[in-house]
C-alpha cells in the first residue's frame, strides 16, 4: 500500500497497514529485547498488565531502536496528514500478548474527556508487528469504519463477534488507526508470544495528561535523540509525570 492509499484506507475504514517497513531481522531483535525488558526488575515501575498482556511505558528511555520506527517517513506522512504537520510523538510502549490471553476490552483511544467524540481525528495510533501477527496469536482486532460512529463500543465485545476483524501481517509491518476506531488485542490461542510496539501521535492541542500511564522523555534520552524526534518530543521532557503533564 502506498502512503496515499494508506491515507485513503485509514480515512474510510479507520485503519491501514504499511507492510514490511522494517526488516524482519530488526523486528526479531526488537521483540527479543522487549521480552527481556518485560522480565527485568528495572522497568517494574513502568509496567502495567498481567501474566497475559502487558504494556511497558516510557520505552523510548530504555531502547533507542524504537526511535527509527517513530520517525519512519511513511508513518509520519500518514500521521501528519490526519493530526497536522506539528504532530507529536507522545508515547512508545511494548505490548506482548502471551499464550492463553483472552481478548482485550475493545475500546477507543484517549476519548474519555470528550462529551461527544469529535469528528476530527485527535490521535493516530500505531502498532508495529515485531512478531508475525496472526488471528491465533493475538493480532489486533478492529471494527472497520467504527471511527465514523463517533461512539464507544456499547458492550464488552466477544472474540467471535462478526464485526471484529483480525489485522494480521508479517513482522516488520505497521498498522495505523484513528483513535476513534473500536479495537483491542485479540485472544492468543496459540503457543507463541505476540510482540507489538505501539507508538502514538497527537496534535499539539491535545492534553496528554489523560493517558495515565504515559511517561516523560528523560533529559538524558532527549539529549541523545535525533533532531526531528527532539522536535516532536520537546513538550514532554522531564523525569516524572508531574514535571510534564498539565492536570486540568
Ligand atoms: O496490543 C494491541 O494489539 C492493541 C493495542 C491497543 O489497544 C492500544 O494501544 O490502544
Image (cartoon, grey):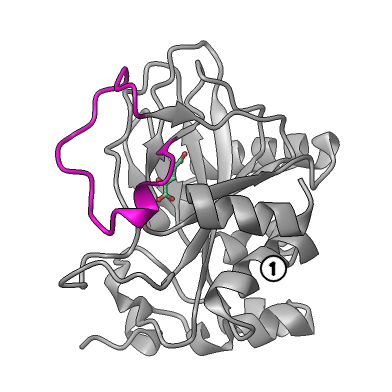
The relative height of residue 104 versus residue 5 in the rendered view (above or below) is above
Q: 230 or 243: which is nearer to us? A: 230
The relative height of residue 190 versus residue 19 in the rendered view (above or below) is above
Q: Residue at x 29, y 66 (%)?
A: 212
Which region shows up in magenta?
A: 142-163
Answer with left or right where residue 51 lies relative to residue 137: left
Picture coordinates of residue 181, whole percent (x, y): 39, 50
Picture coordinates of residue 159, whole percent (x, y): 31, 21
Q: Which residue is mark 1?
A: 76
Q: Quadrant of residue 231?
A: bottom right
Magenta span includes 153: yes
Picture coordinates of residue 219, whole percent (x, y): 59, 84
Answer with left or right where residue 235 lies relative to residue 74: left
Q: Residue at x 35, y 84 (%)?
A: 245
Picture coordinates of residue 22, whole percent (x, y): 81, 46
Answer with left or right where residue 104 lies relative to residue 87: left
Q: Quadrant of residue 211?
A: bottom left
Q: Quadrant of ligand 1?
A: top left
Label 1 packing within 10 angstroms: few (<14), some (14-19), many (20+)? some
Q: Residue at x 75, y 34 (%)?
A: 28
Amino acid at each position: 500500500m502506498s502512503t496515499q492509499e494508506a491515507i485513503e484506507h485509514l480515512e474510510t475504514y479507520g485503519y491501514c497497514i504499511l507492510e514490511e517497513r522494517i526488516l524482519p531481522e530488526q523486528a526479531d531483535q526488537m521483540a527479543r529485547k522487549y521480552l527481556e525488558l518485560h522480565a527485568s526488575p528495572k522497568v517494574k515501575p513502568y509496567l502495567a498488565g498481567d501474566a497475559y498482556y502487558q504494556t511497558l511505558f516510557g520505552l523510548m528511555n530504555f531502547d533507542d531502536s524504537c526511535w527509527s520506527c517513530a520517525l519512519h517517513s511513511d508513518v509520519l506522512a500518514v500521521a501528519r496528514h490526519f493530526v497536522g504537520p506539528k504532530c507529536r510523538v507522545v508515547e512508545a510502549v511494548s505490548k506482548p500478548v502471551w499464550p492463553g490471553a483472552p481478548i482485550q476490552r475493545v475500546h477507543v483511544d484517549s476519548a474519555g474527556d470528550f462529551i461527544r467524540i469529535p469528528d476530527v481525528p485527535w490521535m493516530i495510533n500505531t502498532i508495529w508487528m515485531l512478531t508475525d501477527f496472526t488471528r491465533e496469536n493475538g493480532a489486533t482486532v478492529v471494527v472497520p469504519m467504527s471511527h465514523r460512529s463517533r461512539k464507544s463500543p456499547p458492550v464488552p465485545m466477544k472474540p467471535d463477534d462478526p464485526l471484529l476483524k483480525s489485522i494480521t501481517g508479517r513482522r516488520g509491518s505497521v498498522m495505523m488507526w484513528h483513535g476513534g476506531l473500536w479495537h483491542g488485542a485479540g485472544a492468543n490461542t496459540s503457543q507463541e508470544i505476540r510482540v507489538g510496539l505501539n507508538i502514538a501521535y497527537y496534535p499539539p492541542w491535545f492534553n496528554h495528561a489523560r493517558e495515565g500511564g504515559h511517561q516523560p522523555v528523560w533529559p538524558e534520552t532527549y539529549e541523545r535523540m535525533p533532531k526531528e524526534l527532539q522536535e516532536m518530543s520537546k513538550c514532554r521532557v522531564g523525569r516524572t509525570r508531574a514535571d510534564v503533564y498539565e492536570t486540568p
